[in-house]
Amino acid sequence: MGAKLFCWPQGSPGIAMMLRALLLTGLLSWANGQEGQAMLPEEKSQIRDQIVEMFDHAYGSYMKYAYPADELMPLSCRGRVRGLEPNRGDIDDSLGKFSLTLIDTLDTLVVLNKLDEFEDAVRRTLRDVRLDNDVVVSVFETNIRVLGGLLGAHTMADMLRQRGERMQWYGDELLHMAKELGHRLLPAFNTTSGLPYPRVNLRYGVLNPLSRTGTESDTCTACAGTMILEFAALSRLSGEAVFEENARKALDVLWEKRQRGSDLVGTVINIHNGDWVRRDSGVGAGIDSYYEYLMKAYVLLGDNVYLERFNTHYRAIMKYISQPPLLLNVHMHNPTVSVRSWMDSLLAFFPGLQVLRGDLKPAIETHEMLYQVTKQHKFLPEAFTTEFRVHWGQHPLRPEFAESTYYLYKATGDPYYLRVGQSIVEKLNAHARVPCGFAAVQDVRTGAHEDRMDSFFLAEMFKYLYLLFSEKNQLHFDIDDYIFTTEAHLLPVSLSTSQPPCRGNNTEAATAVEEDLFTYTCPSTQTLFPNNPSFAKTIRDSYKYLTGVGRAFHASPVRGIDLPLHDHSMEPVEFLRSMGVSLTPLSEAGTTGTWGVRREVHKGVYRVKLVAEVTQTTEEEEVEPLLVQLISPPFLGRTVLTAGPAKFGMDLTKQEHGVKGSIVKTSPYTACGPIENAEELSGHIALAQRGDCMFAAKAHRLQEAGAIGVIFIDHREGSNSAETPLFQMVGDGGSTADITIPLVFLFSQEGALLTSALEDHSNVDVLMLPKERRLGKTTDKAEKPLGKMNIKFRLAEEGELEDGEEGEARGPTLQFVLEKGEVVLEEEEYKQQGDSCLTPGDDHMQCSYGQTVTSPPSHSPNDPNTDP
């Protein structure tokens, strides 16, 4: 999203391995000492040149291996053509066979001063691109990427032409293409409410029998509310008011449908009656650019209505959603209730929007939180919890964090943000660069790549990074004469004086509210930072070690425990949890030291008390894997697929024999419209593809069609359970209590085995069941693990003893107690160094402090029964 800165397991081998790991101590990590240091012009120039080289690699790879396809597949070194590659669900709705990446990159070429390449790319666009293809596309994506790309390129071409330096042959052809595309998008607005359909056929529109669309009833708030900049610019450049009028009407409907008590909007709305379908409210996916476009519509068009609406929403956001440094989702009708414990990466644009309003303190706070998350995970995961753990691990090279970094640097001049930008550049080169471009990261925990390079990577990322390291006099034009759309396309702010506002664009009188300094004025850096360049640092420092990563070393009574986790591709706390270990933060363990003296609380540092407490593992700490077992001939139970569970529907762990049935492929495969083969599905287990709509919506439709269970298959090509952690499917924010059938999720590689079996055999019977109840599995009592435990540790200072122990002069003590029936394992350093150590086999041997004593492994390394 963008805008410019305008004027404002427990068997004995597992225990032994765990003890060996936990007894390895090390130093705490410290922050990069370069952060905050000034950057010399020579270093900025080197980084800028590096960014240009990265762009050349990405754009050159697209032109060499993919053009005229819409997108580059950087791992396959070929173009992605819709219909020729496996369907990825709604992600493919941005592909319209119109050379998407080329159009989305046009004005980036001008920003990076590649004027020869720009002129050549414009000629290619006029010669090769057609906009009348029989393809169903997303109205939202086509608007921001293609229409916005054409308008931004026209703006740049017109600017160069007027200077008389080049493009003298240009006759507004890109504007004519933009107008043609605008008319092809207009049928989407043919609804009773004025809210647009989410999809349109470029050739046949929406209601034509050949359109293959028009059955949708819902759209997201951002999808309906992110049209005004492109459509208004098209109207004012072409003289046809119909575009701006339709975009404005959609914004009017969203404003009228806001919750009057909270002034918040939901995430999904019915396009026919205006009822809210999903009532969760935040600033991330589904809503984000609606707020952005209200603010920027005021800047571009000069209409106070948009600013008044934005300010009303902004006050509500800061009252209910903003909990610095977090931005949480709440219920629009009951905004004191948080509806989920995770945030999505799209909200990373919001600090940049706050900079535009002049609200710097929360912008700095949230941006610093996001930066700490990137330090922990290399990139921003698609979603992460309020405890900064990975919720969804994908990272499709999104630019929003770079965008906010650019704005904060322009607002503060703080070189800290140059160092943040430098880290973005380095991580892209180190972890995303491949021989044929840059590849999205399938999971930030494993570093595995995905065969995609979305067009927004070229449209946005390189603009913001290049501008971050450039001075105004190094650009070919004055960047302050333009505003960035949400896809970072450039539109001239002079449009505000070219035509009066649309008739009827009014809002009711606002209720008197307390206003701040920047409600109706442009922020000034002199007002924001009056001779105080350290202002931003004083705010950041409160959040610098929020995730526990990058802490500077200080002498401390707290000793660190270093774990050899690099081979596990897991976060440390997640790895400990997988072994049944939980840690208590210092703030929860108390802060009173020996003799009652208060000690400093170290954020992100955990304390271990001495004696481990054994407790039952809580269910929510891990995802229990399920299985799909093929039991009909010729498989006979030998083919077993690992599946993920759902947080709703039948609980398969409580079904003694699982659920059995024959599988039938759903039509349509995504189950996002009326089920066409309901009679065939009745009494069978449905196969449905992920994407296009929520899991809960699919489950409702398939249950109503008579399915006795559903197996969802991932639409992301190449995903598999070996490389990608399992997750639990969640609902859509509405009630899921009426869903009673079992639901499981297969990654695409496992799903391909199932669909292939269905293609090769007329009938395939499967069992859906928990992993431990797999058909044909034999259980040897002697090999049965002890069960799952949680182990809580605290580290005591020298002299910190329990009552009754004063007479014993001990040094620092580390003791582990694991109990299960008669089995006890302890290790302790007593006051005499020659004390014996107890081993699980009751054999005694001499040991000294710092040694780890374990019993010989009960299995050979190659024994398949060895505890992992």
Image: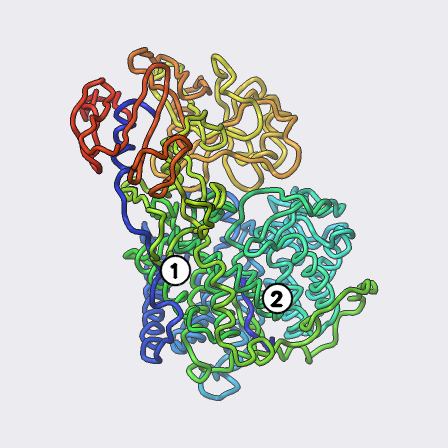
Q: Amino acid at mark 2?
A: Glu
Q: Position of residue 285 (x, y in %)?
A: 57, 51
For the C terminus, the image quarter is top left
Report the residue at 20% width, 21% height from top. Answer: 859
Q: Position of residue 613 (x, y in %)?
A: 41, 29
Q: Position of residue 57 (x, y in %)?
A: 32, 64
Relative placement, left or right, of 264 versus 792 is: right
> Hey, which quadrant is residue 612 in on the image?
top left
Q: Amino acid at mark 1?
A: Tyr
Read off the residue under disc 1: 67
Q: Nearer the viewer, residue 477 or 331?
A: 331
Mark number displayed over residue 230:
2
**Which residue sits furthest front?**
807
Query: In the displayed structure, would residue 810 be above or below residue 136?
Result: above
Secondary structure at badge 2 equals helix
**Which residue sits furthest left?**
846
Q: CA distance from mark 2 to mark 1?
A: 25 Å
Q: Nearer the viewer, residue 634 or 736?
A: 736
Residue depth check, mark 2 versus mark 1: number of the one nearer the observer? 2
Q: Position of residue 615 (x, y in %)?
A: 44, 26
Q: Nearer the viewer, residue 740 or 225?
A: 740
